[in-house]
Image (cartoon, grey):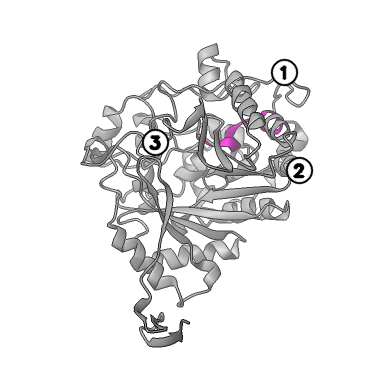
Amino acid sequence: MMDNEQRPTLAGTDSPGSAAETEAAEPPDPPSSLSPRLFPPTVKERERGASFPQSERSRAFRRRFFPDAPSSLWNDWRWQLQHRIRDLAGLARVIRLSADERAAVARHTGPLPVGITPYYASLLSETDPDQPLRRTHIPVGGEYLRTEGEADDPLGEDHDSAVPGLVHRYPDRVLFLATGFCSTYCRYCTRSRMVGGGEYTFSHGQWERAIAYIEQHTEIRDVLLSGGDPLTIATEKLEWLLARLRTIRHVEFLRIGTKVPVVLPQRVTRDLTRMLRRYHPLWMSLHFTHPDELTPEVAESTARLADAGIPLGSQTVLLKGINDSVPVMRELMHGLLKLRVKPYYLYQCDPITGSAHFRTPVAKGLEIIEGLRGHTSGYAVPHFVIDAPGGGGKVPLVPNYVVESGEGRLLLRNYEGHIYSYPDA
């Protein structure tokens, strides 16, 4: 393998790893009746999985590169995890790599390894290294260039960690990092320092320390589960965590931040949604990047979540040459609304080490917001924010629509550029 990421241990579907490998993938089973050993999928489960939709593109990719896998296996999220593309040979089998890509993959060590589910790989261009989704998931030489202002932890999350894995930055809410594992790794990841291997580990004991801290701090009313990706945790383990948090009286609602419904939509099983329904109020933030991700499979995963009563919001990172235009962003936001996903945040790309080739000027984000506001539904316009380096939190930015103020009035510019006077007593 070309990286040091540990493969997830899924009983009955993967060979068992060492204790260290299990811990690196996800915390061990908590001692609870909610966390039985995972067994291989039953015939009934496989039949249910076979009903998950497959686009023609997915079917063609499966027949070409995984001819021995029937639809029932392709639709099994555990099979998808087992067969992730994780090294140079795996990539070269399905993609004609450029010299830059090949050298960058071969050079990689440490966290943020290559990791792409077969489903998501089917969306990548085989021949075009400039295709947006391909650029976001296959390393290039730009990752190894460090520019001024970049840092491994630019948001200061480690500094604001009350206990390992729990970031308490805002007064009434915490960020609970439950795992360091993702099914698919984005190359601009804010937590590239800790996902997919490296010095950060996650364990049941760490979960317990984080829960104890939340119990002791009654001002905490909102818990956001993130990582890594919480939906890569086995359903029984995730339920144990949700149930444990729900017993804390002052925690009013829970949130899950995830890209799994986009890169591993098959994970959104009926069993998962039935479990999630038990822990309302529960909200979910989904990470979308580009309209090419809006597939029939993703329409199914988001529909299942929405039908389970889970409010869905999107978070999109502004990326140079990938989604940094009004037409692309408008298409994405319109597509999300049709999937019952509310566009929530458009993030300025964080200055992670090696991210210069992804970052746009801040003015580009303001230009996109101005190109959306008034030109489409208000529901389709996300908040444009910068997560302030050093732990300052999210700072919203908007175009300046106030032309002049004073003498009891405001001059306002509307989306068409016309000027209107408002009496401001």
Which residue is pictured at 42% across the width and 29% down the height?
194
Question: Do residues under tags 1 and 2 come within 8 Å of each other at their CB atoms?
Answer: no
Task: Name the quadrant containing residue 240.
Answer: top right
Closer to the camera in the image, 58 or 264: 264
Closer to the camera in the image, 64 or 98: 98
Query: Can residue 180 be seen here?
Result: no
Q: Which mark's residue is nearer the viewer, 1 or 2?
A: 1
Q: The N terminus is located in which quarter? A: top left
Tell me how far mark 1 sits from mark 3, CA to CA: 33 Å
User: What residue span does the magenta drawing correspond to?
Assistant: 228-239
Residue 237 magenta: yes
Q: Residues within 10 Å of mark 1 (few under 14, many from 20)?
A: few
Query: How many marks overall?
Result: 3
Which secondary structure class fits the magenta region best?
helix
Q: Which mark's residue is nearer the viewer, 3 or 2?
A: 3
Which residue is pictured at 29% across the width and 63% down the height?
363
Q: Residues within 10 Å of mark 2 (few under 14, many from 20)?
A: few
Amino acid residing under circle 2:
Arg
Q: Which residue is mark 3?
A: 156
Image position of 168 with respect to 408: above or below:
above
| Disc on the earlier residue, 3 or 2 | 3
Circle 3 — which element? loop
Give percent across and percent down for residue 244.
Answer: 71, 30
Circle 2 — which element? helix
Closer to the camera in the image, 100 or 27: 27
Q: Which residue is mark 2?
A: 274
Tell me how far mark 3 sits from mark 2, CA to CA: 36 Å
Q: Which mark's residue is nearer the viewer, 1 or 3?
A: 3
Query: Can residue 380 be seen here?
Result: yes
Give percent across and percent down for residue 327.
Answer: 39, 69
Residue at the far top: name it.
18
